[in-house]
Image (cartoon, helix red, strand yellow):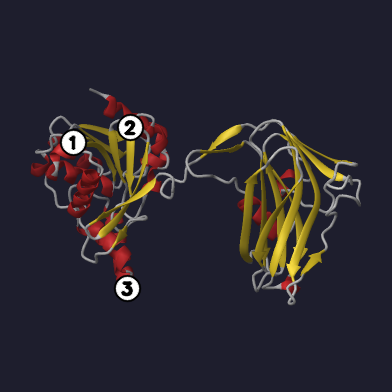
């Protein structure tokens, strides 16, 4: 099995997720034709698959895609894709069109299926456009399924299958069942079930919106119903950081997940230094634009610092506050010294490169925030202070923050680091939800 095909089969045969909550079949099956197209470089091509589907449920999809490679192993060029739900009980031809890369030498042509039922195939056709604009056929092995007693002769399967069809897939050849009553390939798929495709948190067009504020076009996504819950991510991160929290939280709350200024999809037009006060002002303005006078706030790392400042600057806007891995000021007393030294070295490197965007974010870590224990004694919102047992924020500092906020609780999450929401989402989500639900 060539490395190029193995790599493509493992990494490019992915389920296709739609907008909103999407589902796919629990298993997929694909077979692959290959063609040497080096002499047709930079030309247009068409890859067509004729199919008829006898359904056993309503989940079926057909996916066809072409992966182009150069002469060397790992020399990937480009991929073209097409996917569509299948109408039952009639022959249809599905066509993928694309352009061959100038350096493409070999093309792998995939036919992929999802769903339960019987799928009939006939007349798989590859064409390239000639200089005179006519279309030339490129020969493929067993493209009409007429010249072999072996159903998938000439086609390649996933190498992990070791030449065997996966459970729930049966392949055979059936006479008189093709488009013109010729022989056809029949694939019977059974035992598949619908499973959720994770939503593309942070790039979900169905849930995403922009809010134009002073100096920034702020991107946010909303999920669920109930009391509003504002999610604030860490430095250099995005909404996607909470991809293992949003579904659980949205079962109980109206989640508003935000890309902070100058991060994720939020476009910052300013070049001045970033501050957590500026971030807090942005969040207050966002809530105003949404006509929300108050929200619960869950902030992680930088987001935790912003949450603390929101509770100080805009106390009526914060109903309950959860901070994870927050600090009041940057020093070896509050933050792991090794992390600070590494950040200082990285800042110098960014300065040499002229990388203003990332330098602004790193400068924020090294110079902000500027809160004191005395100041946070003014926070009135019920507060939960979280940190990982192996956090870069020192445990004594997390406990001191909780001790100076009236009535605050502190939980040190066992066995995890600063990235507890990703390392142990079940523990993190349960802890947060229990606090927010408490009266």
Instruction: Residue at 24%, 46% (x, y): give it.
Output: 289
Where is residue 54 drawn, in percent x and y?
75, 35
Instruction: Residue at 73%, 44% (x, y): give it.
Output: 161
Name the residue tied to disc 1. 402
Which one is in front in this view, the residue at disc 1 or the one at disc 2? Answer: 2
Where is residue 405 drawn, in percent x and y?
14, 36
Q: Residue furthest top?
A: 439
Q: Secondary structure at mark 1?
A: helix
| Residue 74 visible from this viewpoint | yes
Instruction: Residue at 64%, 70% (x, y): give it.
Output: 101
- Alpha-carbon neighbours of circle 3 within 10 Å: few (<14), some, or many (≥20)? few
CA separation in Å, label 3 and label 2: 42 Å
Disc tally is 3
Q: Please name whichever residue, 96 or 351, is drawn nearer the observer in this view of the structure.
A: 96
Res 303 label: none
Res 253 label: 2
Q: Is residue 143 left or right of residue 215?
A: right
Q: Is residue 413 above or below residue 349?
A: above
CA separation in Å, label 3 and label 1: 39 Å
Where is residue 345 drawn, in percent x and y?
31, 65
Where is residue 134 drawn, in percent x and y?
76, 71
In contact (CB < 8 Å): disc 3 and disc 2: no
Name the residue tied to disc 3. 354
Which one is in front in this view, the residue at disc 3 or the one at disc 2? Answer: 2
Q: Is residue 60 left or right of residue 277?
A: right
- Alpha-carbon neighbours of circle 1 within 10 Å: few (<14), some, or many (≥20)? many
Q: Is residue 298 left or right of residue 117?
A: left
Q: Earlier in the sequence, mark 1 or mark 2?
A: 2
In contact (CB < 8 Å): disc 1 and disc 2: no
């Amino acid at each position: 099995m060539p490395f190029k095909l193995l790599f493509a089969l493992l990494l490019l045969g992915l389920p296709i997720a739609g907008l909103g909550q999407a589902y796919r079949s629990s298993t997929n099956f694909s077979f692959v034709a290959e063609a040497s197209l080096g002499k047709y470089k930079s030309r247009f091509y068409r890859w067509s698959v004729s199919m008829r589907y006898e359904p056993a449920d309503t989940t079926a999809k057909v996916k066809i895609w072409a992966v182009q490679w150069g002469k060397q192993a790992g020399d990937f060029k480009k991929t073209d894709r097409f996917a569509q739900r299948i109408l039952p009980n009639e022959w249809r031809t599905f066509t993928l069109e694309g352009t061959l890369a100038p350096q493409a030498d070999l093309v792998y042509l995939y036919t992929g299926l999802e769903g339960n039922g019987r799928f009939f195939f006939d007349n798989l056709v590859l064409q390239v456009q000639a200089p005179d604009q006519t279309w030339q056929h490129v020969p493929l092995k067993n493209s009409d399924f007429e010249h072999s007693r072996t159903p998938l002769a000439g086609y390649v399967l996933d190498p992990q299958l070791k030449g065997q069809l996966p459970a729930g897939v049966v392949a055979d050849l059936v006479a008189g069942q093709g488009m013109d009553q010729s022989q056809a390939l029949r694939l019977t798929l059974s035992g598949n079930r619908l499973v959720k495709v994770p939503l593309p948190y942070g790039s979900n067009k169905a849930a995403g919106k922009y809010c134009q504020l002073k100096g920034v076009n702020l991107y946010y996504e909303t999920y669920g119903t109930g009391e509003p819950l504002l999610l604030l991510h860490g430095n250099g991160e995005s909404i996607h950081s909470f991809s293992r929290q949003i579904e659980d939280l949205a079962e109980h709350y109206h989640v508003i997940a935000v890309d902070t200024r100058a991060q994720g999809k939020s476009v910052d037009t300013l070049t001045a230094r970033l501050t957590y006060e500026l971030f807090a002002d942005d969040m207050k303005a966002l809530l105003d634009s949404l006509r929300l006078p108050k929200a619960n706030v869950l902030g992680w790392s930088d987001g935790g610092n912003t949450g603390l400042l929101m509770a100080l600057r805009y106390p009526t806007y914060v109903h309950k506050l959860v901070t994870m891995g927050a600090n009041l000021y940057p020093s070896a007393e509050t933050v792991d010294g090794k992390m600070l030294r590494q950040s200082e070295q990285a800042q110098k490197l960014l300065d040499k490169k002229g990388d203003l965007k990332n330098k602004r974010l790193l400068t924020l870590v090294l110079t902000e925030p500027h809160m004191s224990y005395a100041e946070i004694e003014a926070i009135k919102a019920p507060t939960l202070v979280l940190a990982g047992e192996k956090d870069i924020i020192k445990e004594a500092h997390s406990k001191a923050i909780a001790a100076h906020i009236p009535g605050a609780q502190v939980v040190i999450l066992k066995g995890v680091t600063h990235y507890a929401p990703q390392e142990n989402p079940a523990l993190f989500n349960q802890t947060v939800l229990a606090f927010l639900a408490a009266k």
